[in-house]
Image: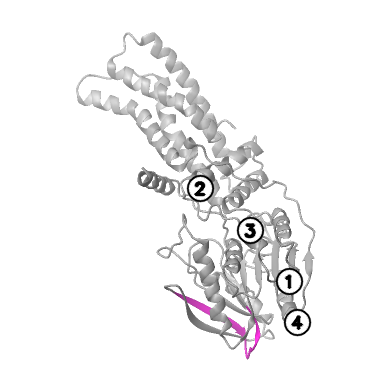
């Protein structure tokens, strides 16, 4: 039974194309290097993490020796893609910190859109630290970890599993679980677009709960707070004022509470930047927003803190904590009928019930028994019933994949236009089903067996669609 559930759940994930979230693209391209900036030297290296051979690049100032070092740990998405953080590595190297970027795990290495292990990712990060510590460019006692977005969870876990890293830095990290973070991102994006809070909650949470229930939401359930509470090394958390992907205010609160036993940490909020630490006016891709840029205030904040550690500085600094317009909250566990397995089963059942209408007609025609009874109401119920649940599931999956930031058209009356169309179709189908029920009752004595079968299937499908639609937000 467990094998069957896993198979059906995997099929549901493929059908819905629901990829994990906690994860927007990280900062990518470097600023152009001016002629008077520090000359950098790149060295290609290889290290091992268990049985895995990992390619990496060390970027250091020319002639570097005994400098602080940092390993950059990637955010969400399978590897390799080490160049996603080349801009950060070059910026840190120009500031006097040796940086390493390395190939993240990918398909075939235990990390996909639907599965992953923080233990594996953390072990890779610690192996990278050990590899950087033996380089002549660095001081082996001053090599730490820097994790962006999903990578923030990774470096916190890595520090809990090993003493290798001398310090830990997170940027755009979340103090919530991956599923709660993704749900906040979805709801925040939808509400910002004008969607009503009730519908934003349904569209933002239900698909996540369905995938998590069947073990298809990557890294679900990981809580960084216990590991952070035990951290006995210097820690820097860097947050973005206009972060639309992770809740900076709530995370700063959780981090501060967890770090009360640590006498050397800083929680810094960078104004006017997005999740990737690029300058922005509101966190979106509005005119003037260059998502490939890296704000120098972010680089300075990290560099000054690391170089301060090298100089023997310590202490606690916490910037003013912002308040999210959309409060983060936990994703409720999916009921039995809200799992990915149940969703796929419901789509299959609706397909059978509503396809029975045209299928019965084809069988009757092929057998030469003549046409079956049909009305505008029966045709309306059959057509909408076949399309509505599939389109509703696909739109919910789209909200998940886009983080709620692309509702696909304008928002009308607190509803994205595609969802409003689906809701109107649901009302039309229910009205047609009522008419069909009346017609079936009046004509039941004159209907043949085939007509009764397909009319009954339509009415059963319409009746089941009511609670299904209410749960998935069609009534919100």
Query: Horizontal placement of 107 versus 35: left or right?
Result: left
Q: Quadrant of the N terminus?
A: top left
In the image, which disc is placed on residue 233? none
Q: Name the residue rendered at 78%, 71% in the picture.
A: 315
For discs 2 and 3, the disc positioned in front in the rendered view = 3
In the image, which disc is placed on residue 226? 3
Indicate the position of residue 186 as horizontal and vertical percent values: 60, 47
Compute the Cα span from label 3 to label 4.
Answer: 30 Å
Secondary element type, mark 3:
helix
Frontmost residue, 367 versus 174: 174
Name the residue that disc number 1 marks. Answer: 301
Compute the Cα span from label 2 to label 4.
Answer: 45 Å
Q: Name the residue rendered at 42%, 65% in the picture.
A: 109
Frontmost residue, 300 versus 211: 211
For discs 2 and 1, the disc positioned in front in the rendered view = 2
Of mark 2 and mark 4, the one earlier in the sequence is 2
| Extreme-left residue of the structure | 367
Q: Residues within 10 Å of mark 1 (few under 14, many from 20)?
A: some
Secondary element type, mark 4:
loop
Give residue 24's quadrant in the image. bottom right
Of mark 4 and mark 1, the one earlier in the sequence is 1
Query: Horizontal placement of 211 versus 6: left or right?
Result: right
In the image, which disc is placed on residue 311? 4
Of mark 3 and mark 4, the one earlier in the sequence is 3
Secondary element type, mark 2:
helix
**First to last magenta residue range:** 53-69
The secondary structure making up most of the magenta span is strand
């Amino acid at each position: 039974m467990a094998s069957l559930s896993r198979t059906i759940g995997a099929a549901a994930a493929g059908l819905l194309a629901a990829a994990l979230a906690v994860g927007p693209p990280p900062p990518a391209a470097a600023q152009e290097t001016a002629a008077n900036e520090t000359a950098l030297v790149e060295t290609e290296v290889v290290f091992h993490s268990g049985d895995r051979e990992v390619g990496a690049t060390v970027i250091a100032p020319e002639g570097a020796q005994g400098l602080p070092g940092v390993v950059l740990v990637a955010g969400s998405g399978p590897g390799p893609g080490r160049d996603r953080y080349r801009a950060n590595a070059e910026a840190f190297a120009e500031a006097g910190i040796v940086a390493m970027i390395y190939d993240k795990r990918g398909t075939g290495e235990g990390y996909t859109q639907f599965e992953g292990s923080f233990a594996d990712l953390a072990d890779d990060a610690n192996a990278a630290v050990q590899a950087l510590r033996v380089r002549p460019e660095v001081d082996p006692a001053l090599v730490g970890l820097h994790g962006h977005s999903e990578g923030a969870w990774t470096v916190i876990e890595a520090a809990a599993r090993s003493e290798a890293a001398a310090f830990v830095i997170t940027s755009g990290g979340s103090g919530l679980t991956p599923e709660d973070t993704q749900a906040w991102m979805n709801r925040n994006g939808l509400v910002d677009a004008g969607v009503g809070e009730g519908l934003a909650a349904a569209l933002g949470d239900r698909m996540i709960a369905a995938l998590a229930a069947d073990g298809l939401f990557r890294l679900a359930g990981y809580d960084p707070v216990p590991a952070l509470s035990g951290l006995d090394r210097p820690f820097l958390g860097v947050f973005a004022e206009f972060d639309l992907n992770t809740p900076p205010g709530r995370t700063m609160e959780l981090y501060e509470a967890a770090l009360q036993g640590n006498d050397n940490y800083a929680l810094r909020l960078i104004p006017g930047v997005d999740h990737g630490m690029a300058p922005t006016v509101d966190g979106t891709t509005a005119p003037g927003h260059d998502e490939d840029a890296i704000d120098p205030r972010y680089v300075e904040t990290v560099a000054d803190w690391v170089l301060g550690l090298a100089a023997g500085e310590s202490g606690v600094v916490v910037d003013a904590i912002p308040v999210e317009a959309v409060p983060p909250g936990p994703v409720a566990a999916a009921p039995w009928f809200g799992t990915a397995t149940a969703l796929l089963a419901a789509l299959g059942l609706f397909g059978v019930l509503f396809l029975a209408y045209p299928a019965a007609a084809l069988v009757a025609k092929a057998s030469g028994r003549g046409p079956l009874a049909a009305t505008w109401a029966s045709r309306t119920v059959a057509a909408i019933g076949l399309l509505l649940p599939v389109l509703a599931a696909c739109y919910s999956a789209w909200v998940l994949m886009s983080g709620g930031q692309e509702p696909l058209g304008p928002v009308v009356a607190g509803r994205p236009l595609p969802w409003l169309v689906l809701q109107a179709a649901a009302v039309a189908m229910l009205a047609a089903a009522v008419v069909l029920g009346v017609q079936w009752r009046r004509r039941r004595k004159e209907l043949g067996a085939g007509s009764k079968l397909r009319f009954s299937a339509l009415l059963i499908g319409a009746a089941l669609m009511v609670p299904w639609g209410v749960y998935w937000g069609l009534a919100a």
